[in-house]
Amino acid sequence: QSALTQPASVSGSPGQSITISCTGTSSDVGSYNLVSWYQQHPGKAPKLMIYEVSKRPSGVSNRFSGSKSGNTASLTISGLQAEDEADYYCCSYAGSSTSLVFGGGTKLTVL
Amino acid sequence: QVQLVQSGAEVKKPGASVKVSCKASGYTFTSYGISWVRQAPGQGLEWMGWISAYNGNTNYAQKLQGRVTMTTDTSTSTAYMELRSLRSDDTAVYYCARDRLGLGSGGYYYYGMDVWGQGTTVTVSS
């Protein structure tokens, strides 16, 4: 199972909005509304930001939102803040034989 | 509070095995599954597999089939991940994470990996 495709890096200024894409196939992202997104700061464990494409866990800022169209899922961060600078990973369910697959990760830089 | 606490760092020689533990607390262990995820130095996240703490069902990543075994001990709310025939490219930080995947009346649901362990560094070197 190949990893999902994410841009290596994105950047934005404080207060701006950015979107990170996550492209899969009809076997994973396109078949299931089970995409999750994780934020990881250097040296720390990942943190769940979005699950089931667009649902936010309790405690996650509403500046984070998710969506999906076809085989591509997206994470949007609005009102960028310095603490949003981190690596972001998407993850999708890919069927019972494969289960889960991650994207390669995107480094977000807040300018 | 809900937490997962993993065992300490390991240094192993090529060809050896390693067994990492993940002790859960603050929730009903058997109501969730545990995924194992690893991250090689400077690299991204790699899903290794999943085990149901309810019935012990497992699902492993294809590339690790035959080398990895995941188990649970419900009496101590602890999950284990054993990796055999270690190679240098198994050097990584290994994480356990709580998650819940299932099939309901509305189709599949997956609540994501919402609680993570602190990570266990496994170094494979001769």
Image: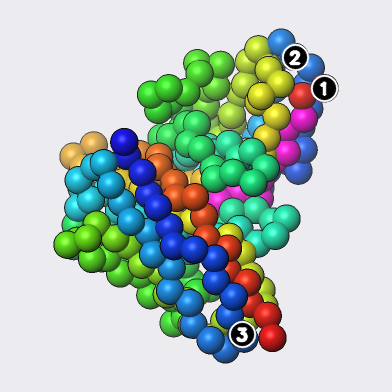
Q: Residue at x 68, y 17 (%)?
A: A80
Which element type, helix, strand or loop, lies under badge 2? loop
Q: Determine which residue is flagged by label 1.
A: A111
Give residue B69's quadrant in the image: bottom left
Which element type, helix, strand or loop, lies under badge 1? loop
Number of residue marks = 3
Count neighbours of disc 2 (C-alpha within 10 A) and say few if under 14, some if 14 to 19, many if 20 or more: some
Q: Determine which residue is flagged by label 3.
A: B13
Q: Are marks 2 and 1 in contact (CB under 8 Å)?
A: yes
Give residue B40's quadrant in the image: bottom right
In this rendering, position of residue A21 left or right of residue A26? right
Amino acid type assigned to the residue bearing label 2 in the image:
Pro
In the image, residue A88 above or below residue B80: above
| Residue A99, visible in the rendered structure | no
Q: Nearer the viewer, mark 3 or mark 2?
A: 3
Q: Nearer the viewer, residue B107 or A56?
A: A56
| Residue B84, visible in the rendered structure | yes
